[in-house]
Amino acid sequence: MIYAISHRVQCILVEKHCFGDCGKILVGAIVDPQLGQLYVCREDICPHQERELDFCEFEGERLILRKLK
């Protein structure tokens, strides 16, 4: 599964948790017309996750939107 985190919607939390505390975020991004730049994460367990939403299929894998807390 691919987990995606919207930088536009959650920029402060992405910087704090994904690039800071965790550091496992992948630098390459997916661009969605509505959500903007989506950072990619492959970690199934995220201690900073509030909830997730099954979004779509991307390159043969499920893309899950992750909302951080």
Image (tube, rainbow, N blue to C red):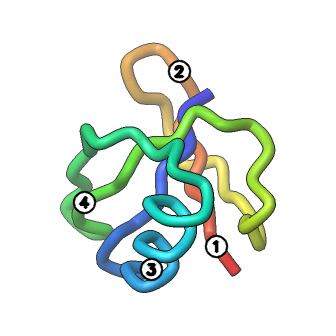
For marks 3 and 4 on the same chain, the one whose residue lies earlier in the sequence: 3
Q: Sort mark 1 into few (<14), some (14-19) or many (20+) by Cα contacts within 10 Å.
A: some
The image shows residue 43, relative to residue 48, as above or below, that is above
Give the image location of residue 24, x and y in percent. Answer: 53, 42
Pointer 3 and pointer 1: residues touching (CB < 8 Å)? yes
Circle 4: residue type: Gln
Q: Quadrant of the C terminus?
A: bottom right
Q: Can you name the residue that lies furthest to the top here? A: 60
Check disc 2 and report the residue beneath it. Answer: 61
Q: Which residue is found at the position 25% from the left and 55% from the top?
A: 32
Pointer 4 and pointer 1: residues touching (CB < 8 Å)? no
Disc 3 to disc 2, how far (Cα)? 23 Å
Q: Which residue is found at the position 56% from the left and 68% from the top?
A: 17
Q: Which is closer to the viewer, label 3 or label 2?
A: 3
For marks 4 and 1 on the same chain, the one whose residue lies earlier in the sequence: 4
The residue lying toward the viewer, choosing from 7 and 34, is 7
Check disc 4 and report the residue beneath it. Answer: 37
Disc 1 to disc 2, how far (Cα)? 21 Å
Circle 3: residue type: Gln
Circle 1: residue type: Leu
The residue lying toward the viewer, choosing from 56 and 63, is 63
Q: Sort mark 3 into few (<14), some (14-19) or many (20+) by Cα contacts within 10 Å.
A: few
Q: Which is closer to the viewer, label 4 or label 2?
A: 4
The image shows residue 1, relative to residue 56, as above or below, that is above
Check disc 3 and report the residue beneath it. Answer: 10
